[in-house]
Image: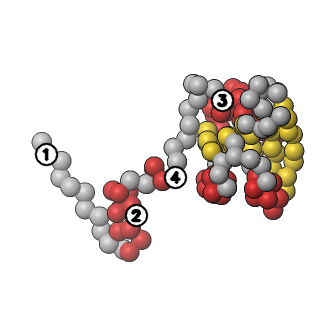
Amino acid sequence: MQITTVGLDLAKNVFQVHGVNRHGKVELRKQLKRDQVAAFFANLPPCLIGMEACSGAHHWARKLQALGHVVRLMAPQFVKPYVKSNKNDAADAEANPSWTASPSRTESPDVREQSSPSCRSKLRAWQTGGVHVRPAVPS
């Protein structure tokens, strides 16, 4: 069978991978070291990958999207209801395909969607030492 949805739980050194086919049957349970992740997903056919949003998730999302995968991020508080047992890395990885396939999921916005032109100009002014003047609000 072909893996269609993968749950990836990120950690400092060891990542948990949980893959299911289109029927929801478990096809893959694997533990990967940080340096093995890119090579593993490069050899996997394009699929849907679900991850909890955290500081490193956007980096891995961009890397996996460059390999042709579709990546969805979700805030940890919304993943917790899908975890069947105690909250640990393997249980989180198993829960990720569940919420990824769920029609009522709440996704975290993409990094590029968060940075609007006005935010970028404020950041640029702050970085260069310029002062950003807020426009007056008409009464």
Asked whether residue 10 is in view, the answer is yes
In three-dimensional space, the C-alpha distance between marks 4 and 1, rounded to whole angstroms, equals: 32 Å
Residue at screen point 78% across, 32% down: 21
Say what amino acid the circle numbered 2 marks. Answer: Leu
Say what amino acid the circle numbered 3 marks. Answer: Ala
What residue did someone put label 2 on?
123
Residue at screen point 30% across, 68% down: 131
Query: Within 10 Å of the Cα at label 4, are there few (<14), some (14-19), or many (20+) other Cα atoms?
Result: few
Mark linked to residue 111: 4
SS class, disc 1: loop
| Residue 78 point in image, percent of width and height | 63, 32
Q: Is residue 69 above or below residue 122?
A: above
Query: Within 10 Å of the Cα at label 1, are there few (<14), some (14-19), or many (20+) other Cα atoms?
Result: few
Mark in front: 2 vs 4: 4
Query: Within 10 Å of the Cα at label 3, are there few (<14), some (14-19), or many (20+) other Cα atoms?
Result: some
Residues at badges 3 and 1 in contact (C-beta under 8 Å)? no
Q: Earlier in the sequence, mark 2 or mark 4?
A: 4
Image quarter for residue 9?
top right
SS class, disc 4: helix
| Residue 46 point in image, percent of width and height | 69, 46
Mark in front: 2 vs 3: 3
What residue did someone put label 1 on?
138
Q: Earlier in the sequence, mark 3 or mark 4?
A: 3
What residue did someone put label 3 on?
101
| Residue 65 point in image, percent of width and height | 62, 52
